[in-house]
Image (tube, grey):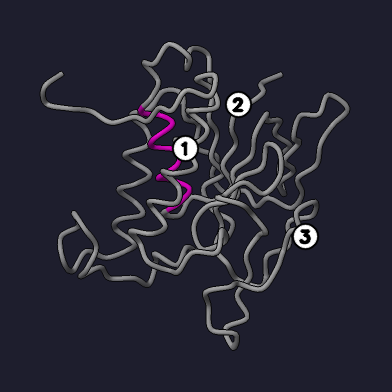
Amino acid sequence: MLVYDVLIIGGGVSGVSCAQVLGSAAKKAFMEGKTIGIVMHQKASMLQDAVFNNAFGIQPGTLGSDLLTQAKENLKIYANVTQIEGEKVSRVRRNSAQLFVVETNKAEYVARMVVVAVNSSNTFAIEGLMDYVEPHKKSIPTKNRIQLKNIDHLVAEGIYVAGTLAGHRSQLAIAAGSGAAVATDILTLWNDGVETHSHDSIRK
């Protein structure tokens, strides 16, 4: 049985950013044998209707839909990242071995850690996580947005949240940074608590 070391729920900005950073760290010694899965979409991404004119490093006028397509292609370069398409997560629970079982409309997946990176819509309905739901602290109340209770992205042992669902505002750079922050926290955990990150340099 395949057990993912991390299963990311949501293929928007924060989820893909998290997967990219984890995937890019594959050559680190502590990453040997580590597997990452990402359930690409819970529903239509907010990126579908977006156009970016003020996002760092992105050509002004770039459509969110194009960015979403390119992000999925970019993830393919990481052999340790598996994209799961066309499935919706309905439940997250622990089994007798204290691993997470993530149930979708088509299958079940087992993981040691879970990152929840779907948007902050009040239609959020993943059984097993509802006790963590609270009103979004940085959104306009009339929008009825929600977030998961967390401390620095950590919801509970083994459960992280990223992006707007972590209580951040809806801005591409913030969402991407949130996903990357979760990834570096996980990398640090895997590195026996020694702070680490993953980036490249032209000097190497």
Is the stretch drawn in magenta largely helix, strand or loop? Answer: helix
Q: Which amino acid does label 1 sit on?
A: Ala
- Separation of disc 3 and disc 2 at Cα? 23 Å
Q: Give the image location of residue 44, x and y in percent.
A: 51, 64
In-image side of 75 versus 80 (left or right): left
Residue at (55% x, 27% y) in the render: 189
Residue at (49% x, 57% y) in the render: 163
* Circles 2 and 1 in contact, beta carbons < 8 Å: no
Q: Which of marks 2 and 1 is nearer the N terminus?
A: 2
Residue occupied by mark 3: 130
**Residues rendered magenta in the picture:** 14-24
Residue occupied by mark 1: 183
Q: Give the image location of residue 68, x and y in percent.
A: 36, 54
In the rendered image of this protein, does residue 202 appear above or below residue 158? above
Between residues 17 and 108, which one lies in front from this camera angle?
Answer: 17
Between residues 146 and 189, which one lies in front from this camera angle?
Answer: 189
Q: Which of marks 1 and 3 is nearer the N terminus?
A: 3
Q: What residue type is labelled 2?
A: Asp
On whether residue 9 falls in the magenta region, the answer is no
Between residues 27 and 103, which one lies in front from this camera angle?
Answer: 27
Residue occupied by mark 2: 5
Rate crowding at label 2 as few (under 14), some (14 to 19) or many (20 or more) other CA atoms within 10 Å. some
In the rendered image of this protein, does residue 117 appear above or below residue 168? above
In the rendered image of this protein, does residue 78 appear above or below residue 1? below
Quarter the C terminus occupies: top left
Secondary element under disc 2, as helix, strand or loop, is loop
Q: Give the image location of residue 187, x and y in percent.
A: 48, 28
Q: What residue type is labelled 3?
A: Met
Instruction: Give the mark toward the camera: 2 or 1.
Output: 1
- Separation of disc 1 and disc 3 at Cα? 23 Å
